[in-house]
Image (spheres, coloured by chain):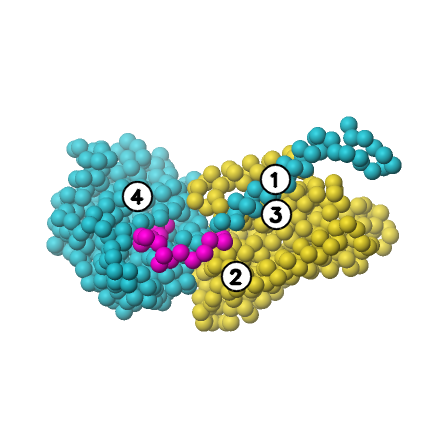
Chain colours: A yellow, B cyan
Amino acid sequence: MANRFTKIKGAILTALAVGLGTVPVWGSEYAMLFFMLFCIYLALAQMWNLLAGYSGLISLGQQSFVGLGGYTVAVLSSYYGMNIWLGVGLGGVTSVLLALFMSLFIFRMKGVYFAIGTWIFAEALLVWFSNWAYVKYGSGLFIKPRNGLSMAAIYYAALVVGAGSVALVYKLLRSRLGLGLMAMRDDAQVSETLGVEVFRLKLYCFLISALVTGITAGIFYVFQIFIQPYKAFAIDWTVKLVFMVIIGGIGTIEGPILGAFVYVVLSQFLAEYFSVSMLILGGIAIVVILIAPKGIMGTLQEKLGFELLSPRRN
Amino acid sequence: MPKEKEGKLKGISRREFLQKSSVTAAAAAISVAGLPVFTSLAWAGKRDHILIGRPNPSTGPLADFGAPTPWVDDRVLAKINADGGIFIEKLGKKLPIKVKIMDTESNPTKAAELTSRLIMQDKVDLMVAFHTPDTVNPVSSICERFKMPCITLDSPLETWLDGGPYSWAFHSFWSVEKDILPTYVGMWEQIPTNKVVGVLMANDPDGVAWSAIFKNVLEPKGYKFVDMGRFPYGTQDFSSFINAWKKENVEIILGATIPPDFATAWRQCRRFGFTPKVATIGKAILFPSAVGALGGDLANGLSCEIWWSPDHPFKSSLENVSAGDLCADWMKDKNQEWTQPIGYKYAGYELAADVLNRAKSLDKETLRKAIADTNMDTIVGPIKFNDQNYCRTPLVGGQWVKGDKYPWKINIVYNKQHPEIPTNGTFTAIG
């Protein structure tokens, strides 16, 4: 299907791919830091969007996987000297296992109760980890890679998850799973009578989001060098993800891309302005919700029919 | 209303235009605002000044530590820059020192972010930081990862060593096991007690480290510890702690908390009618403002560590000023009582100036070697780093009593480890 936007879309995507792929070449170390943060938040936001925007699962507990992924890397590298990237991968595995366990409980709940259920799990993990001698209680752990790590290596790892998350969501939504999700989004009961396995779809999405979130968090904490339970399992993570996805456009693939970019620009730009940054971020969220309730990309899609990555197959 | 022709909107209404353009403008403005932030090219070495990065807890629960900034920083820099600054061999001239102070909000995550920014965006030549593991640990770790020479002070050694081993970060302060413990116990043993200790320690690096060390060393010596666990910052209800202490007949309270949490706990103790003979608290009651905030006469008899005071017999290496003189200047300028971080902030800059003067270069490796070779007397005492990159500074014990000029003052009541620092009071029980 060719519409007037196809050429522009192709050009934009190629430019982004080439640009991001070569940041260590043309950019300063700070540029690598910036785009690394962008890729990490992008991956986290895409996963939250996959749940909330496409599967109808509002998760207020993504920080469970953030914390668990981070602590897995910390424990494996600090205590057992494991290769750092292997540890990151295992962070994803532990997150999936946690998600499986969580699903036993929270998938019996719907809507608001599901949301609160995810949050409660995260808070329980916070209390557990902060009182666990094995991970040194609240004093946290350091992440010490056996060999030195360059900024470029961390950046490329973040790029892989960032770009990978977008590609994953795109492929997912264009597959049979995606068709099922969209049917489910429109009307869960009708789609169930038509043979869509609602429970299975939701579970797959939940597990996939846990996997990617766990791995992404591992990379984030490799960069941060230390992890503490009170920050790793804090509701702040959900607040950031909601901000990014709402501003960017919930239920669109490009929405989290724009939202993550806006968030990183703002938080970096406002880093020198103490707590005013939170006030400004909140203010911007309110303004966007009032002017463009579907987020910036959502509004662009609606008004101009412009979609960079369309989940529709036609 | 927009005109409709064959289902397609023809023309654009003013409302729509405003909506779309404001959304696009907002997006564009945000991106453009961000551009200069990361496309600026490398500047190090091409600047006309030396830039020191200074993450500082100016706001948040650790604000009392950060409060003497920027008074101390400005004063020391004025002294260093008075005759032009530091001579850099490669450039054949003197460069003044400028410092970029950034607020960590007492938050270790923010401290880590700011340190990364200072290293990668501001491209500082040297990093200097102080004030508790929540500031010092993230700064040291990030500097170590990105090979930035880093001078830190004012955070217990054991928690700093946890993040090691270090090549690029250098630290000076006292040790919990070798300095705090003997000082606290030295004070406790000056009055008769039943050796039952109630533990009030936060769930942070200090709380976890101190409680472990004290129990390990003192339990074999006959002390009994009543430990209800590590509590998170911001806990409002200590009744379970206080009830347990009352039940076990605790006469000594041992603490390591941030100032607001101790205030909450101590006030609750009074409300529950619990007054131990001794309350020795690390970190939380170092400041006249913190003890004053307790209210009434709750501060009377509280004991803690003293790592710097006007009575410390040390002088500045930059100007003819003793610890006492510096405190007098502070009190004159600010009309406030002196606080302990003043000396350590000052010493941090003394070290930086000494390092830069000896290195005569802004090359990171040269600076690192220069820091490692440090051997000087500062306003907090002699500093010489060992092969693990740290130096122990002297510690004595203090107790708060009612003051004459100011509501509360702290007396040095125990100095057995450092007799060169004179005492000016005797340790007494509370109440």
Q: Position of residue A106 (x, y in %)?
A: 67, 51
Q: What is the CA distance from the residue labelled 1 to the residue labelled 4?
A: 39 Å
Q: Quadrant of the N terminus of chain B?
A: top right
The CA distance from mark 2 to mark 3 is: 24 Å
Residue in view at x 74 percent, y 43 percent:
A304
Chain ID of residue with mark 3 = A
Quadrant occupied by the C terminus of chain B: top left
Per the image, label 3 sits on a secondary structure element best described as: helix
Residue that mark 1 sits on: B25
Instruction: Tell me the magenta residue range.
Output: B38-55
Residue A34 highlighted magenta (yes or no): no
For marks 3 and 4, give the CA distance: 36 Å
Residue B45 counted in the magenta span:
yes
Tell me the amino acid under the disc marked 1.
Answer: Ala
Q: Earlier in the sequence, mark 1 or mark 4?
A: 1
Q: Secondary structure at mark 2?
A: helix
Camera-near label (2 vs 3) is 2
